[in-house]
Image: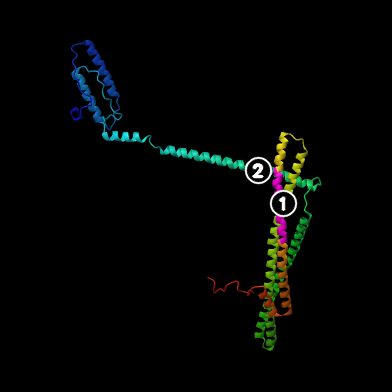
Amino acid sequence: MSEGGVSQPATTEIPISSNGDPRQIGHDKALEQDLQQVMDAVPDLNESSAVSDGYEGNLKGVLRQSGMVKDTPLTSPSPTGAIVAPSQTAASRLAAQASMGPPHLPGAQVVETTQNSSIATEEGGRGVALEKLEFVKKWSVNTYKCTKQVLSERFGRGSKTVDLQLEAQIEILRDTQHKYENVLRLAHELTRHFSLVVQTQRTLGDTFADLSQKSPELQEEFGYNAETQRLLCKNGETLLSAINFFVSSVNTLVNKTMEDTLLTIKQYESARIEYDAYRTDLEEMSLAQRDAAMMVKIETAQQNFQVHKEKYEQLRANVSIKLKFLEENKVKVMHKQLLLFHNAVSAYFAGNQQQLEQTLKQFNINLKTPGTDKPSWLEEP
């Protein structure tokens, strides 16, 4: 592009005469060379090549015409090579940003939040680890003391706290549970075998009925026997319902009610061992030489002993109450179930169908008709 098509630079051309001073002329030539080197060092960008070329051309023309330049500061080109005029809008924006304070950096906030969360996670993990370590430490000490107490009792070297009355009741309960489990096992066997008898009677009655249709000369005899087997099968199903109710009630008493009481007894026995272990530990410390450190240990042992003593006494009271209620419940339940079993078996073998049905109504037992559990193939989806 020619020099005439480019706007004038921001600096003002000032023609100056040298008046024939050779030193001034030499000085001007040196200044011209320095300016030429500065203009050559400016990077040639594609966006502002026309402006920079025009500016350099005008500057060279002025220097050629005047021969000397006054020491006036020149406006330095912008980093992009273009001369940008000051803007009032940009100035107002800069002032507004300066009044609002430093800019908000979301990245810095994210980094700070991440650091805080990581620190909190590390502190939480450290706290959990310390709690687990403390728990393991207490568990190890307690296990050591209890194991030592058990071995001492087994080898006859340690003392044992015994409640004779309560121990006798616990022994009776365990013996009773063992005997009731045997009754329950035999009742299951009776149910299984008797159900096979009933099934055989049903099959035999169906066979007699079929033969009564196919044997005209024995139709009446086969018919009598078929009707008898069907009646026995019906009464047998009624007796099975009574026996199943008996088995279910005894099973609840043995495997739930008694087992719950025995679980409390196990907790009581564990508390008794802990109580004796800390009692023995406290007695051994009391016999040792007492100094400042030993007094602190004795005080700690006394506190631990008191805690386990309260736990032992509380569980002992719970066991006594449960044994009392269990005995009352056992008598009540077994009285009802034994009466049911006796009346149902007696009515069945006496052939008294009416009394057998009345026994089931007396104990609110619903008779399940064979085949009602499974829906018909017409009712299946």
Quadrant in the picture for the N terminus: top left
Predominant SS along the magenta part = helix
Q: Residue at x 24, y 15 (%)?
A: 29
Residue nearest the viewer, comparing 357 with 83: 357
The residue that label 2 is drawn on is: 136
First of labels 2, 1 by sequence position: 2
Q: CA distance from mark 2 to mark 1?
A: 26 Å
Q: Can residue 233 be spotted in the picture? A: no
Q: Is residue 34 above or below residue 44?
A: above
Question: The residue under label 1 is which amino acid type?
Answer: Glu
Q: Is residue 62 left or right of residue 341?
A: left
Q: Residue furthest bottom?
A: 217
Q: Specify start and end residues of the magenta stretch as a single range.
A: 303-324
Q: Can residue 314 be spotted in the picture? A: yes
Question: The residue under label 2 is which amino acid type?
Answer: Val
Can you give x and y, in whole percent of width and height, for residue 3 in the image? 19, 27
Q: Callout 2: 10 Å neighbours few (<14), some, many (20+)?
A: few
- Report the mark closest to the observer, 2 or 1: 1
The residue that label 1 is drawn on is: 313
Mark 2 element type: helix
Can you give x and y, in whole percent of width and height, for residue 282 in the image? 74, 42
Q: Is residue 376 above or below residue 109?
A: below
